[in-house]
Amino acid sequence: MDASNDSLLHRLVAFPNGEDTVKASFRTAMQRMGLKSVFDIVRRGKAPFAVELAKYCDVDAGQVYDNAASYARQISRLYQEHRVSSGKDAQRRVRRSLGSDSTSASAGYQALFEENWDQFCNEGDIGAIDSPVAYLRALYLFARQLEQLPAPALPARITLEERRPDLKKLTLDQQSAFATRPMLGLINDTLRSNIEAYLEDEGKGRTVQQALASERYPFSLPYNLHHHQCLLGLGAGKPALGELNYRISLQLPFSRGHSTYGSLTTSHLDAQILLSGLSPEQQNLLLAPIASISKSDPLKKSYGTRNITNLGQLEFFKERTGLTTQQVEQLLAQGSYSPRSSINSPDARQTGYGASYINGPEQTSVLSIATQGEMRVFTHHSHERFDRIQRMIRLHRWTAIPVAELDTLIVNAQRSEGTDALNANTLRTLGVYRYLNQRHGIAPEEFASLLHDMPVDACGDRIPLFDQVFNRTRLVENPVWQLPLSPMTATDRQTLSYLSAGLGLPITQDSLLLLVRQSEKYLGSPKHDLPTVSSLYRQARIARMLGLSPLECTELARLLGGDDFCKALVTGRLQTSESAGADILDVLMALDWAVGWLRQNELDVLQWCRLFDEPETSLSLNQNLETRLAKLQADANHDPQHLIETLLHDVADLGTEYVPCVMQLAGTDALAVVAAIKAAPGIMPPVLATVLRAAEACQRLHLGSSTLKALMENPTWLASNTSKTLTPHTLYLLERFSHCARHQAQSEENLLHYLQVANQDGRHSEKEINNLLANLLNWSTEDVSRLTAQLEPAQANSMEAVDWIMRCQACCVSTALPADLLLQATSLKTQSPVSDWKNVGAALIAACH
């Protein structure tokens, strides 16, 4: 610092004569502190200045600062007086005469001071003292001053330079000062810059997205951007990932080979896993092998620490997981969250409600919290249990299911399958639960009871599910649960009344007693135990969830899958391999689709099912039918065709032109029907019952006789493997033909013409046929061609294929995706490459905008 221009700094302290050493020390201190004027001192603030000056010399810092502030005020005043004074030579004031005009010269501010306003900032200018830039600069300097204050009692500060390293490089211009930016964008930029700096130091060449997807700590990771884009793009009422697979499945529950319902290019099991909403990285984390003492690296990665032995300390565990003590107690089902048993229920086959998965199959005592000295620690902990804890914490956050209910859901899935590890069936369970919860509002523990026993315990203030169902009131006398091996019979009125009140079902042959018979058929003799009660609840709850009566639910399940489906409703078993056939999750998805389609078409479930029943050998006759049959027998010498036409017209109001089609659907002819009527006077012949049901089905189709005749004569126009007789698949395709003809093809003739053209081998190219179908459906030829390329041959030459194209079109409309990306979305699975997820995610986000 030059002595010629620091006279004011020297005057800040009165140095006695002969104190040259102190004077030199003060001058050196000013140089080291970078202070060149009194304004630099005032700008720092009195306290910070005193602290820093004490590091270099012993002068009175308070006196120095006060003197500097005084000089600064004087200089500022002199400068302002100079600014507001006239820049011209001082004009002598002339006293006005008495007769002079007093208004000739204005006495305003501008006339008196003659300000040069060009030297000042305009209002709102970036350089104004009240502009956002000035405010930002003041905040920045103030924050830096606070960081320089000593704070020995506080933990190490995270400085502003560490939090926002971009601020010191920020150019203050019109764009950065006044352009509005979303806060989320600023946060993402800050996080991305810090992550990129970390990855650069790491030197592995990973991108930010790869790092977020592969890391496991903190517990908000792993994060898959492209999967999240898919979830966001398919929100707000659109079909979700996995649900798309079911909507455009090649096979439907009414089709032959219904076990493939939900499959397209991937398995229906992958579709159910997609319904869980978990990303591939989240799935891999959950299904990874459990850590152990010999393999502890995954545990270190999951908790973000190498000191995994310290996880046994509660405070360290809370710091690693971000949980509170109350949340840890909830996780372990302890303290105020300890389980409470039902007031009156059968004995449960397993114990450990609320934390069964965390404690695992180990035979040791449960994981708990204890106090040792002044420290709270975990007792009976192990690497395996800490690994299961971190999986449960993450799964709870990802699914938003309460911990105890999530534990019940997971454990019941494991017990239904007979395993103690998380696997693909666990993810399938989560997926189907999530789907049905959104559609029907079923609760986690209610869904868990569809797989295994009902929970008879609850944590905290919750009421056990068993009590919610069966012990809501005390109006009905409780059964004697202490004798679980005693059989439950149809004459046990006390137990049946108790179950009837809880399930809300009457004690009739088509309601509660039907469920008891089903349980007896597939489980053995019903007993006074929890498995029997759970089986009855399972069947009743599934029916109620779908809005069906027990009889309707049972009959629909039998129609769709026979004894296999009925058994799954009773037992709730999960299959251990894909080749084992349909399990309870497949049955639920099939029933949900079938009920939805029947209601959409305003069809009664029970009447629909009875169209395909095997008729009984001796059906009673009503008086009208008995009279008609007696007349037919009296006219037995007439033409059988004419007799049947007359009978169907009188009994079923069926036109003569429809009779050949009805006979074909019934798999018989007029001669056989007349012979059966003659052979069984006074009763309903089974073949006639079949004919009447076929007639009823035909009348509901609202199709012209010529159209129906053409379809019956060409059954491959419906499907390549369809039956010529009345089946659920045949009737479904006829219904879809009728729907398409009325809503999309404008007429039955147009649709029939297309099917005729599509089945003329070699006369028309695939492009011509696809173009014809596109015009029929009012869609683009490109999208139709992309879809038909999945078929064999590469054209829609049956109503089954046309129906599939129509369902794909509906999904394209609802998701705003083109056909090729719709197919790519349904081909996604855990093992799909990142590029596939990226393409679908980007397309869905773009479609939203």
Image (tube, grey):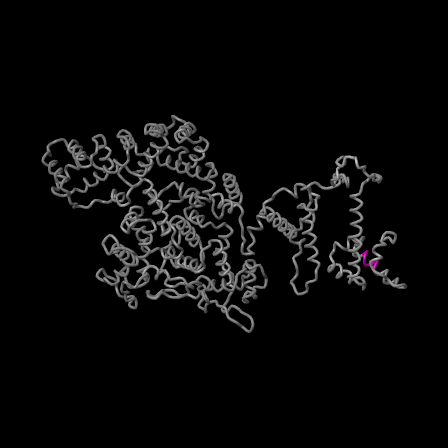
Vertical side of 496 occupied by 735: above or below: above
From the viewer's side, name the closer residue of 487 and 123: 123
Residue 309 percent coordinates (x, y): 56, 66
Please report the residue visible at 37 percent of the width from the left and 66 percent of the height from the top: 341
Extreme-bottom residue of the structure? 373
Question: In screen coordinates, is 341 left or right of 627?
Answer: right
Question: In screen coordinates, is 408 left or right of 307?
Answer: left
From the viewer's side, name the closer residue of 443 and 694: 443
Magenta range: 26-31
Vertical side of 356 occupied by 836: above or below: above
Query: Based on the displayed image, in which of its 4 quarters is residue 631 positioned?
Result: top left
Residue 81 percent coordinates (x, y): 79, 46
Please report the residue visible at 36 percent of the width from the left and 52 percent of the height from the top: 584
Extreme-right residue of the structure? 18
Query: Based on the displayed image, in which of its 4 quarters is residue 20 positioned?
Result: bottom right
Extreme-top residue of the structure? 763
From the viewer's side, name the closer residue of 400 and 644: 400
